[in-house]
Amino acid sequence: MSGFRLLASWVLAFALAAFFLHTTFHPLADPTPGYVKFFDPPGENLPFSLLAERSGITLFEPAGRFVTGILEVIAAILLILPFSRRFAAGLAVLLTGAAVVLHLTPWLGREIALPEGGTDGGAHFLVYVIFLALSLLLLVVHPSERRRH
């Protein structure tokens, strides 16, 4: 059973790290404009621009976006290291949980309005709910120091 837990821990850690790096740097070609935290011009990141506009808190864009991106990169690095994985999973729960909570407020909403019209159909919200569940699962699955010896 501990072999399965260790394998699951690695798979979940790499999935979460890839997600965080994808949302901050978007290493794939031709990224979707408005969703890359570090490379979107100020005011053009859709979720953070909506938060700043609807809440009246101007710190959401671009300062909040960059702070969130830095925390996500830190979490991605710590997720790969087994000795810091439990702490990183807790940080991932906080980051993804905050995103889910913000999606449930009137400031952001479950569906994000797209600049070309229409909405994303709740895809952004759903992705963060899924990764919140994966973060919580990693907290449970990752073997603790007491169990490894």
Image (cartoon, rainbow, N blue to C red):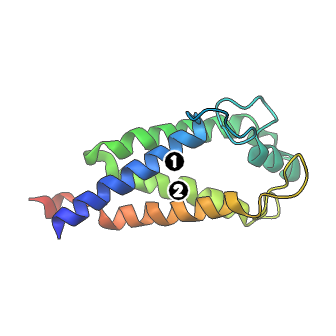
Residue 12 lies in quadrant: bottom left
Q: Which residue is mark 1?
A: 19
Give how far apart the Cα atoms at labels 2 and 1 are. 15 Å
Residue mark closest to the camera, 2 vs 1: 1
Q: Which residue is most to the bottom?
A: 1
Q: Which residue is mark 2?
A: 94
- Looking at the image, residue 46 lies above or below residue 3: above
Look at label 2 and name its amino acid. Answer: Leu
Residue 143 visible in this rendered orientation of the protein: no
Look at the numbered disc 1 and give the secondary structure of its residue: helix
Look at the numbered disc 2 and give the secondary structure of its residue: helix
The spot of residue 104 in percent (x, y) is 73, 67
Residue 43 lies in quadrant: top right
The residue at 59%/37% (across/down) is 24
Q: Which residue is most to the left?
A: 149
Look at label 1 and name its amino acid. Answer: Phe
Q: Is residue 125 left or right of residue 140?
A: right
- Looking at the image, residue 74 lies above or below residue 140: above
The residue at 55%/33% (across/down) is 27
Q: Quadrant of the N terminus?
A: bottom left
Q: Quadrant of the C terminus?
A: bottom left
The residue at 79%/63% (across/down) is 109
Q: Which residue is most to the right?
A: 117
The spot of residue 25 in percent (x, y) is 58, 33
